[in-house]
Image: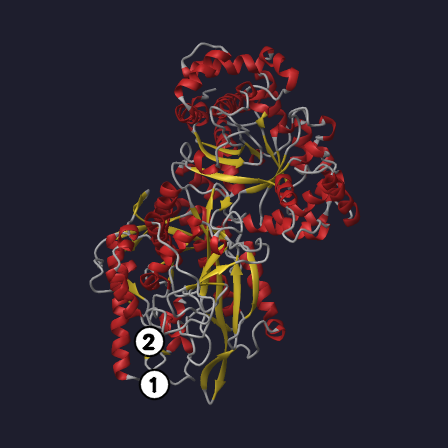
């Protein structure tokens, strides 16, 4: 038999490492010898005599060209430096994706961002026991003692807040109390367990079995609701583990529980020596998937091959996944990858010889095991060098079970243009899988110069009908549409050609500015949007269709929410199923006005989430015969709608916008004050991005809680920038600031990019933050913010800073779009044509405060 194709596939496929840990600095106190063994204490002295140690030492020495001794390799590491050896190891390993459980406490470990220097895709796996311990160590802000209820609320809230940012959860219950998890543990038992763990003092170590089981079950419920997998340590490990309790067969009670039939559980480490037990579970329980990291390369060659063969005795191939379980040292990643290729080749070759597989089937199995299974299972995106052909095949695997459904399914490729309009191209799913996911779809370049009320390029934008770009799907955002059966949607990047960003791309602009903030100041901005919108119902009066508010109740009215509860259950569930956290929803002060607050996350993700949330609200409202509009001022005699955004700065996983203690003035750190001062200084020109249509300025009026004067305040809702101290923030400190001016007509990526650019200017120039205005703003003492789009455009013309960050050509296009809006506003004001309010909203113009028409139905549709 000719195994050359199988050998070539195994050697060339780029690996998706679905379970690993952080690498540490060269000078970490974690001994390098632990790269070769799970032994600790006196047992370490015996580890050099194991088969895997001797083999691994030779492998690393060969890679480095050094002598085959622990001392020689350690000297090579010291002389070469971590950057050099990491580059060598990852290049030799051929790993393109890392999913990292960063819950291991290593001395001088590097954060997730550091690892992106060596592999294009890095994601986080969240260790649930570590989350619980950190929450208990922090304590309650009011100084009271933990109860099970208060802990559960904090714990579940934390899990949900990061659900959209991670690839899965992980439990080390096997290390704490074993895998015989009781799915019926009572609240009393859990509370007693919590008290026992707390009584041992700090730092808290979650160890009581009832409490461990309770944490696991709470986490599994969250994981299942967000369609996230749960990794579970099973089988062997260091001596903290009781091997007798780490047999995966102990999980049967959880797997049989009806609450968890839709969960997805990954058994790690080939469950060695319980590999056959793991294989059996994967064959009879839909929830169980297998991962063979750590067993490779920690066993002998015979042991590694036997273990993987045992996994495949019963388990479906599409349930078996590769990982290195690499940790602390880049050499562990190299060894795991090298020997996984060797072992999988040997196992699949023998399966062909035995007649279990044909060679073509073995080739496909290798691709599944090394990449495709994990890509599909963890919903990983090919953002860079990850083999596009692999992803193309994965897309085919993701098609529905019947080819007929696949042929009839559609994929919406969604983007937001420079005017803030949501647009999409729609392609059949088969074509998306076969070609579009890899090559994108063509689109006229002038799309970024279209205005919201007509499909024509703005004069002076520099963009015409000549030339095309590519809309390249970002597969990390590809999701099934909850409200439309047989449809999916995906956000996209604008590229000149596949892999080459187009300078006008809004998502790329935000990435570019975020990178400057990271490179210069090691900072990341996080954002959370509050979306206000109106629900309108259609009635027919005297033969004419008329749109009226859904209700006329008051702010936070229970009756208003009761009337809309069915709609909001659907909206909340839909947004939730998209992996987006809904923090809060309520009736707003306008007639038929509501608000949905989304979870706090990285600004790039927050912008993506906002787009999907708007899509969900509009679509489900439409399903119920209603019209949802995010228009800044849909009706002049009622309140406006904003898309307020809360912003904070993070460094190495900590909120550094907030001061360290109450001694800092205003409770804001120096970094936070300088950043906020930059935003305040450039706010008049930022308005051209965050309040981009004439109708926006009908909302930005005094005494409407939208911010009309250039100032900031402490929890002052009349200030455009509001320092916020939400519940849970220590007294005297500020956790974030809110920008009130942002509205639903803005392109969220461009709006956030402008804010970051202004903040960077504040940091660079160490701008001072003026004193807060903690009263109703006095118009005689404060500068009025632009009262029209023309004024904010004039401010933008005078502000050269944003051009530096946003890009000159993109800035030209944005200004041109805004200029056309201003021209239309002027023309309409000169005619002062009135609009019959009984006409359908989708067919008329929205009046400005002086009675002129400002926004066409297209403008309303985009908001």
Q: Is residue 206 left or right of residue 702?
A: right
Above/below status of 346 relative to 518: above
Which residue matches tag 2?
Answer: 854
Q: Position of residue 849 (x, y in %)?
A: 36, 80
Q: Secondary structure at mark 1?
A: loop
The label on residue 834 is: 1
The label on residue 535 is: none
Residue drawn 28% across and 79% down?
Answer: 828
In the image shown, does 535 or 756 lie closer to the viewer? Answer: 756
Q: Position of residue 53 (x, y in %)?
A: 56, 15
Above/below status of 347 relative to 804: above
Residue 863 lies in what quarter of the image? bottom left
Above/below status of 353 relative to 705: above
Does the residue at mark 1 contact the one at mark 2 (Cβ under 8 Å)?
no
Q: Is residue 488 visible?
A: no
Q: Position of residue 332 (x, y in %)?
A: 51, 24
């Amino acid at each position: 038999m000719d195994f050359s194709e199988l050998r070539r596939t195994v050697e060339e496929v780029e690996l998706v490492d679905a379970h690993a840990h952080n690498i540490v600095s060269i000078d970490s106190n974690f001994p390098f010898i632990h790269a070769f063994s799970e032994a600790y204490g006196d047992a370490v002295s015996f580890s050099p005599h194991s088969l895997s140690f001797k083999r691994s030492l030779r492998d690393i020495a060969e890679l480095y060209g050094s002598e085959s001794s622990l001392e020689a390799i350690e000297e090579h590491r010291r002389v070469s430096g971590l950057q050099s050896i990491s580059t060598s190891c990852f290049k030799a390993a051929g790993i393109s994706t890392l999913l990292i459980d960063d819950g291991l406490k290593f001395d001088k470990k590097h954060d997730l961002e550091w690892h992106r220097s060596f592999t294009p895709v890095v994601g986080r796996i969240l260790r649930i026991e570590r989350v619980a311990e950190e929450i208990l160590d922090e304590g309650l802000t009011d100084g009271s003692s933990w109860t099970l209820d208060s802990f559960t609320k904090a714990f579940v809230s934390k899990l949900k807040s990061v659900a959209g940012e991670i690839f899965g959860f992980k439990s080390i219950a096997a290390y704490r109390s074993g895998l015989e998890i009781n799915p019926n543990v009572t609240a009393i038992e859990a509370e007693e367990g919590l008290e026992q763990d707390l009584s041992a003092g700090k730092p808290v170590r979650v160890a009581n079995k009832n409490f461990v089981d309770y944490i696991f079950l709470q986490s599994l419920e969250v994981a299942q609701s967000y369609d996230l997998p749960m990794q579970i340590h099973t089988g062997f490990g260091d001596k903290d583990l009781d091997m007798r309790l780490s047999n995966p067969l102990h999980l049967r009670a959880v797997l049989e529980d009806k609450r968890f039939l839709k969960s997805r559980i990954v058994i790690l480490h080939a469950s060695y020596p319980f590999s056959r037990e793991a294989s059996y579970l994967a064959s009879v329980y839909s929830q169980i998937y297998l991962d063979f990291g750590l067993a490779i390369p920690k066993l002998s060659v015979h042991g590694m091959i036997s273990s993987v063969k045992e996994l495949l005795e019963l388990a479906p191939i599409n349930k078996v996944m590769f990982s290195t379980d690499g940790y602390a040292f880049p050499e562990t990643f190299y060894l795991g990858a090298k020997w996984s290729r060797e072992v999988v080749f040997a196992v699949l070759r023998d399966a062909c010889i035995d007649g279990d597989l044909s060679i073509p089937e073995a080739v496909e199995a290798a691709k599944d095991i090394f990449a495709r299974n994990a890509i599909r299972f963890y919903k990983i995106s090919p953002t860079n060098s990850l083999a596009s052909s692999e992803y193309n095949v994965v897309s085919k695997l993701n098609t529905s079970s019947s080819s007929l459904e696949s042929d009839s399914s559609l994929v919406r490729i969604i983007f937001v243009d420079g005017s803030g309009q949501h647009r999409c191209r729609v392609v059949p799913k088969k074509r998306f899988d076969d070609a579009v996911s890899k090559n994108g779809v063509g689109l006229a370049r002038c799309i970024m110069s279209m205005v919201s009320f007509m499909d024509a390029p703005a004069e002076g934008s520099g963009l015409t009908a000549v030339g095309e770009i590519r809309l390249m799907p970002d597969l990390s955002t590809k999701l099934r549409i909850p409200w439309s059966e047989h449809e999916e949607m995906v956000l996209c990047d604008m590229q000149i050609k596949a892999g080459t960003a187009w300078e006008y791309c809004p998502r790329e602009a935000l990435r570019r500015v975020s990178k400057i903030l990271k490179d210069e100041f090691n900072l990341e901005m996080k954002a959370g949007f509050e979306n206000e919108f109106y629900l309108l119902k259609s009635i027919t009066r005297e033969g004419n269709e008329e749109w009226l508010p859904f209700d006329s109740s008051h702010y936070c009215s229970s009756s208003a929410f009761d009337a809309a509860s069915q709609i909001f259950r659907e909206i909340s569930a839909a947004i939730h199923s998209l992996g987006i956290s809904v923090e809060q929803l309520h009736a707003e002060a306008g007639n038929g006005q509501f608000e949905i607050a989304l979870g706090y996350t990285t600004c790039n993700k927050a912008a993506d989430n906002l787009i999907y949330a708007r899509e969900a609200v509009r679509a489900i409202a439409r399903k119920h015969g209603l019209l949802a509009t995010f228009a800044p001022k849909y009706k002049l005699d009622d309140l406006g709608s904003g898309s307020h955004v809360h912003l904070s700065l993070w460094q190495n996983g900590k909120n550094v916008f907030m001061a360290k203690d109450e001694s800092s003035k205003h409770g804001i750190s120096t970094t936070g004050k300088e950043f906020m001062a930059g935003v305040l200084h450039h706010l008049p020109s930022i308005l051209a991005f965050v309040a981009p249509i004439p109708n926006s300025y009908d909302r930005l009026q005094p005494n409407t809680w939208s911010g009309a004067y250039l100032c900031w305040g402490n929890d002052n809702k009349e200030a455009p920038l509001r320092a916020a101290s939400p519940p849970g923030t220590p007294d005297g400190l500020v956790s974030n600031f809110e920008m009130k001016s942002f509205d639903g007509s803005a392109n969220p990526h461009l709006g956030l990019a402008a804010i970051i650019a202004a903040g960077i200017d504040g940091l660079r120039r160490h701008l001072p933050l003026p004193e807060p205005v903690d009263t109703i703003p006095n118009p005689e003492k404060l500068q009025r913010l632009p009262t029209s789009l023309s004024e904010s455009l004039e401010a933008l013309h005078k502000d050269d800073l944003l051009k530096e960050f946003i890009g000159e050509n993109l800035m030209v296009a944005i200004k041109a779009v805004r200029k056309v809006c201003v021209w239309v506003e002027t023309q309409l004001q000169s005619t002062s044509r009135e609009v019959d309010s009984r006409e359908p909203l989708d067919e008329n113009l929205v009046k400005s405060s002086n009675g002129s028409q400002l926004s066409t139905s297209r403008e309303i549709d985009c908001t």
